Image (tube, grey):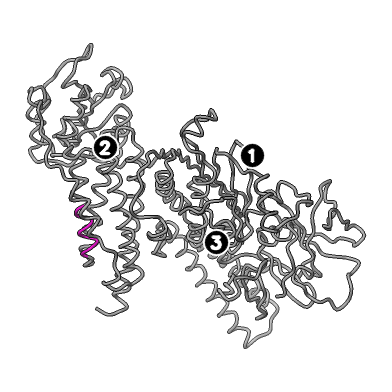
Amino acid sequence: MSTGSTNKAIKEFIAEAEEILEKLNLDLCSLSFAEDGVDGAPDTINSLFRGAHSLKGLSGMFGFDDISELSHQLENLLDNLRLGRTDFSSAVSEVLFQSFDMLVLLVSSKGEGKETADQPDIAPVLAKLGNLFDGPAVESDDPLASGSIPSELLNVLTEYEEHRLRDNLKRGRTLLLVRASFSLDTFDQELAALTDLLKQYGELISTLPTSGDISERIGFQLMLGTEAALETVAADIGNDEYIEIVSISGKQAGSTKVEPEPVATAASESAVEEAPSSAVSEVKGKSSSDLSEDGGASLRSISRTVRVDIDKLDHLMNIVGDLVLAKSSIVQLSSQFKGAGEASLVSELHKASRGLERRLDELQGAVMDVRMVPVAQLFEKMTRIVRRVANELGKQIQLEISGSDTELDKLIVEDLTDPLVHIIRNAVDHGVETPQERERLGKPVRAKLELSATQKGNHVVIEVADDGSGIDLGRVKAKGIEKGLIRESDELSREDLLDLLFVPGFSTKDEVSELSGRGVGMDVVKNNISALSGMIELNSEAGRGTTVVITLPITLAIIKALVVTTGDRTYAIPINAVLETLMVEAAEIKTIERREVIELRQSTLPLLHLAEFFGLERKVGRPDRYFVAVVGLAERRMGIVVDGLVGQQDVVIKSLGASLAFVKGVAGAADLGNQQTVLVLDVGGLMSDALRGEGRLSV
């Protein structure tokens, strides 16, 4: 196999494996949060079993024996759990998470092309998995031995369905048998609807096909374990001549035990659907994992693959088809121009070019749409971080997620991963008190951590909020004085004190731990967010909690920009951050607390002279009139003062590279239509730095 085809195969494996791992992560967290463990989440443990089985088959097909072996052993443990052969415990939960972490490391190493000698050692995890196999559980009192369940049903149940049947009988639940027949044309939708309805009342143990009453119909028998009365379930289903409900165990008033019809002799798998992932996660316990977050694989996706809805691709193909027609029209008109100079041809060419422009705009929007992914891909990974850090610190956290369907550019989501991990870890470590401290303060023992996303215009706002102790501004000021960042006589606002937390090397922790106290974190977070043309803000109230607000553009790939000039330089400002442009007389500018401002619709707007911020030399002194581009992110507003406005233009932002990453106020570079290269301003970084009064930089 050639190198090119090998690389393609690896990419395909990584994309498939990451999708399986994402689902495993959600199911593992959901299982560990379930109050009754495996018994309280049979669908989840079954979904985990299927995920491990899929990963085993996928890795075996690609020849990754280490992943296949670990997945196989994990599958065996999960099979024992779902069949009741191994009891679920905190030790089992920890080994499951350690196995998952090792699988993530292994998949990451395949994507990075590491040699065999550099692959993670799976032997310790395999040994822990092997120690958990207890062997088949001994049934002292088999509830199926009573003979109350018809043998026709028992003979066609799978081993897993039989285990779930025993569990429901042990819990004293009533077993209902729902016989239904559906039209061959619509049975899939009707069966799914009936299944969803029955799951509201209990556990759907099995779905068995039967012969329908009429040749044009197909029949099913669904076994439900429930604590609800037969009449309640029947009333919800309604009066349907093709559906019959009977009780086959338990005592219910008004119910009649009816022998079920013979069923198919071939065993059938249960039609249990995967349980939806909950937006609320509860984290308990004090045991720590052997694989630390810092030593594990990054939460960033290895694959750069984006799964695309086929309708979006159809839309792209239609646009491309129209563009081909528009190009042909322009080529034809150009050929006619060679032989004639009629004004009508000029008009037709102009019309064709405008049509081409419209379709190109549409194509640009469609391509942007393809790049969009829900932030759920990122938020779901945070559940594991919360659980791990809470366990390490002996804290109890309830994570609430909202707005996970909000979409962002795939590359922005990936670059946001590390900053969000920092913020989450800080919230659990710094913000949330221990259970004992919360109890002493009269707070719920389980702390609340909220992670939300909302779209506001061309930006997405992500918030991380906790109900912990908040930030002690007095302590922040004392640390700032101690480090020489401020003077004791300085009169600082609440916002100024919170901004100290983003200064490199600043920390209020006196002790260094694995999670905090090194003075590294929030400054890196701010720099990473600024690199995405975003902005980060802190809001905190002592004793009530802290909220971190991140504002990001939806995409950075192709954007409209306002091209401006100042001095002898030309810059581009992302248009999604520009609220309006103004012409301001020099006399209108006032100075308040050493900051230049203007009055704009009964509010004060701070100004930033772009030439002075970048230390550019002017050919002449300050002019009598200025152009001001009013920009805004989140709730903040600022006016960028420039010498001239050139106009709007589509630009593609290119990175300046690591060697120029230190330059503040610049998001990247772009080429204009006249072959001129200009710098694209980082509005979020400019606003944060300028409003704090940070210095000039030559660019």
User: Mark 1–mark 2 contact, CB under 8 Å?
Assistant: no
Residue found 21% across the figure and 38% down from its top? 87
Which mark is nearer the camera, 2 or 3? Answer: 2
Is 529 in front, or is 410? 529
User: Where is residue 394, by image quadrant?
Assistant: top left
Tell me which amino acid carries mark 3.
Answer: Gly
State the residue position of label 3.
365
**Label whose residue precedes the other's in the sequence (3 or 1):** 3
Please give the count of numbered marks on the rendered protein.
Answer: 3
Q: Which residue is mark 2?
A: 38
Q: Gap in Å between the C-alphas at discs 2 and 3? A: 46 Å
Q: Secondary structure at mark 1?
A: strand
Please give the name of the residue rendered at 56% of the width and 68% of the height, measured from the top-left corner. 360
What is the three-letter code of the residue carrying label 1? Glu
Query: Which residue does the numbered mark 1 point to in the structure image?
Result: 541
Residue 574 in picture, x, y percent from top left: 66, 63
Between 165 and 355, the one lying in front of the other is: 165
Q: Is residue 588 magenta?
A: no
Q: Is residue 443 left or right of residue 670?
A: left
* Residue interval drawn in magenta: 65-73
Q: Residue at x 29, y 20 (%)?
A: 228
Q: Is residue 40 above or below residue 680?
A: above
Quadrant for the N terminus in the image: bottom left
